[in-house]
Amino acid sequence: MAENQTLEVDIDQVAAERDKAVVVDVREPGEFVQGHVPGAVLMPMEQMASRMAELDRNTPVYVICASGNRSKAMTDLLRAAGFDARSVTGGTQAWINSGRPVEEGTR
């Protein structure tokens, strides 16, 4: 694997491993409230650097956004800081398209 290649997981892996990992949604609050992976933690992209300490370095982190672009950048940031982070391919849209349950609101 190339050194600069972002590690990715698909939504099937996220669904299977949500109980062993944390799903971090890096979208904006307005996007998050419209629908997100159940149990996802909202941590908008611009807050990631200042909120990393809230995450457990011993727990895998699945980073999700709308389609997979923002999550790649934030996954790279987390990995550089020593986290076991992976970007969710296809993002929340792929989750919704798969017919999986979606939470709305801020919880």
Image: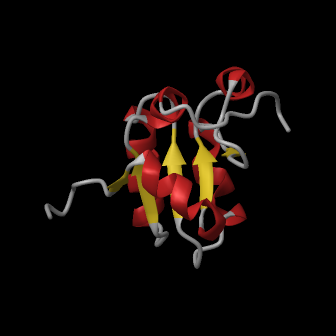
**In this picture, residue 94 sits left or right of residue 101:** left
Outermost residue, right side: 107
Residue 56 at x, y = what percent? 65, 72
x and y, in percent, of residue 17 in the image: 55, 64
> Residue shown at 64%/42% (left/top)?
47
Image quadrant containing the N terminus: bottom left
Q: In screen coordinates, is 6 left or right of 106?
A: left
Q: Is residue 38 left or right of residue 27?
A: right
Residue at image coords 68%, 33%: 102
93 versus 89 height, above or below? above
Q: Quadrant of the C terminus?
A: top right
Foreground of the two, 7 or 17: 17
Which of the 4 image quadrants contains residue 25?
top right
Q: Is residue 107 above or below residue 39?
A: above
Determine whether, in the image, residue 54 is placed left or right of residue 45.
right
| Residue 30 position by quadrant | top right
Looking at the image, is 48 positioned above or below residue 99? below
